[in-house]
C-alpha cells in the first residue's frame, strides 16, 4: 500500500477549527494519520502545518518552533475571550491624546522574557478538563502563568481605536492575551480584532494550499505539494 509521509502547509480560513482542517485533510488524502502543529482559533487565519503519516513523529519538534503573527487589536473594550468572538465585559474611553509613543511603550512592556497568564477560553486542561469547557459553565479557575518570549514586534499602523501589529514569539504564546494585556497597560482595555499566522519556524505561506484546494483539490496534486521528510529536515537545518 502507498505510504504518504510528509508535511502539508495549509492557509486556514476563518470560521473553522484546526480540527476541521485535519478532518478534511484526512478525507482528501485518504489517510487517518494526520495531525497539526499548533492550534489556530476559529477566527484566526493563516499557516497551519499538517503532519502526515510518519511526519507525525516530528509533530512535537515543529510545534515547539517560534511563530510570527500579523494582527490587530481594538482599544476600548475587553471581552471574555480576549478576542472579537467573545462577549464584551467592559467598555472604556480611549484617551483622545493617545499617541504612538505611548502605544509603543505599552508594547515594549511585553518584549523579551516574561510570564503570561493563559486565558480561560483555551485548551489548557485543569484536572483533565479543558479550560474553555469550564468557561462555558461560567467558571473561572486559577491559571499558572507561563514563561514566554517576544523576539520582536512591529506596529504596522494606528487608526484609533485599532492598532495593527506584527509579533514574533515563542511557542505557547497567546496573542489574544497579548492584546488584552497591552490594553490594560494603556488603561483603556483592548481585545484582539484579527489574527493571521504568517510563519512557524522555517515555514511560511509561500508553499501553502488554501482550505478550498484542500477540500476540493485533486488528491495527487495535494500529495505533490507536500514537503517530504528529507526536505523538511533540510529546511529546518536539522
Image: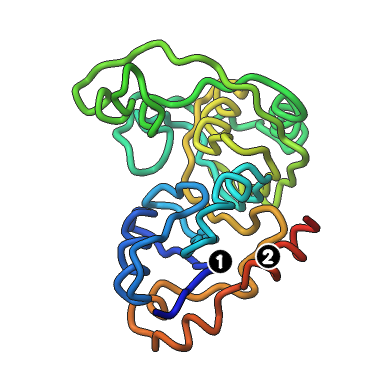
**147 or 116: which is nearer to us?**
147
Identify the residue at horizontal 50%, vertical 26% (top origin).
Answer: 189
Q: Which residue is mark 1?
A: 7
Nearer-N-terminus badge (2/1): 1
Position in image of residue 129 (x %, y %): 29, 24
The local secondary structure at tag 1 comes to strand
Is residue 213 visible from the viewing direction of this image?
yes
Position in image of residue 82 (x %, y %): 43, 33
Q: Would you place residue 19 above or below residue 187 in this image?
A: below
Q: Which mark is residue 155?
A: none
Q: How many marks?
A: 2
Is residue 46 visible from the viewing direction of this image?
no
Q: Are marks 2 and 1 in contact (CB under 8 Å)?
A: yes
Identify the residue at horizontal 67%, vertical 46% (top origin).
Answer: 65
Q: Is residue 120 left or right of residue 192?
A: left
Q: Which mark is residue 232?
A: 2
Amino acid at each position: 500500500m502507498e505510504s504518504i509521509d510528509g508535511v502539508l502547509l495549509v492557509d486556514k480560513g476563518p470560521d473553522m477549527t484546526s480540527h476541521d482542517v485535519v478532518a478534511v485533510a484526512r478525507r482528501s488524502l485518504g489517510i487517518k494519520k494526520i495531525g497539526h502543529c499548533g492550534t489556530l482559533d476559529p477566527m484566526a487565519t493563516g499557516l497551519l502545518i499538517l503532519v502526515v503519516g510518519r511526519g507525525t513523529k516530528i509533530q512535537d519538534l515543529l510545534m515547539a518552533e517560534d511563530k510570527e503573527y500579523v494582527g490587530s487589536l481594538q482599544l476600548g473594550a475587553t471581552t471574555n475571550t480576549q478576542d472579537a468572538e467573545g462577549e464584551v465585559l467592559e467598555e472604556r474611553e480611549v484617551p483622545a491624546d493617545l499617541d504612538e509613543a505611548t502605544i509603543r511603550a505599552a508594547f515594549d512592556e511585553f518584549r523579551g522574557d516574561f510570564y503570561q497568564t493563559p486565558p480561560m477560553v483555551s485548551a489548557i486542561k485543569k484536572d483533565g478538563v479543558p479550560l474553555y469547557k469550564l468557561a462555558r459553565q461560567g467558571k473561572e479557575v486559577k491559571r499558572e502563568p507561563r514563561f514566554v518570549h517576544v523576539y520582536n514586534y512591529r506596529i504596522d499602523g494606528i487608526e484609533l481605536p485599532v492598532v495593527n501589529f506584527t509579533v514574533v514569539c515563542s511557542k505557547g504564546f497567546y496573542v489574544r492575551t497579548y492584546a488584552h494585556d497591552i490594553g490594560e497597560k494603556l488603561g483603556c482595555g483592548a481585545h484582539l480584532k484579527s489574527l493571521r499566522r504568517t510563519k512557524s519556524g522555517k515555514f511560511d505561506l509561500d508553499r501553502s494550499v488554501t482550505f478550498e484546494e484542500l477540500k476540493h483539490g485533486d488528491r495527487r496534486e495535494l500529495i505533490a505539494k507536500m514537503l517530504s521528510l528529507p526536505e523538511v529536515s533540510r529546511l529546518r537545518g536539522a
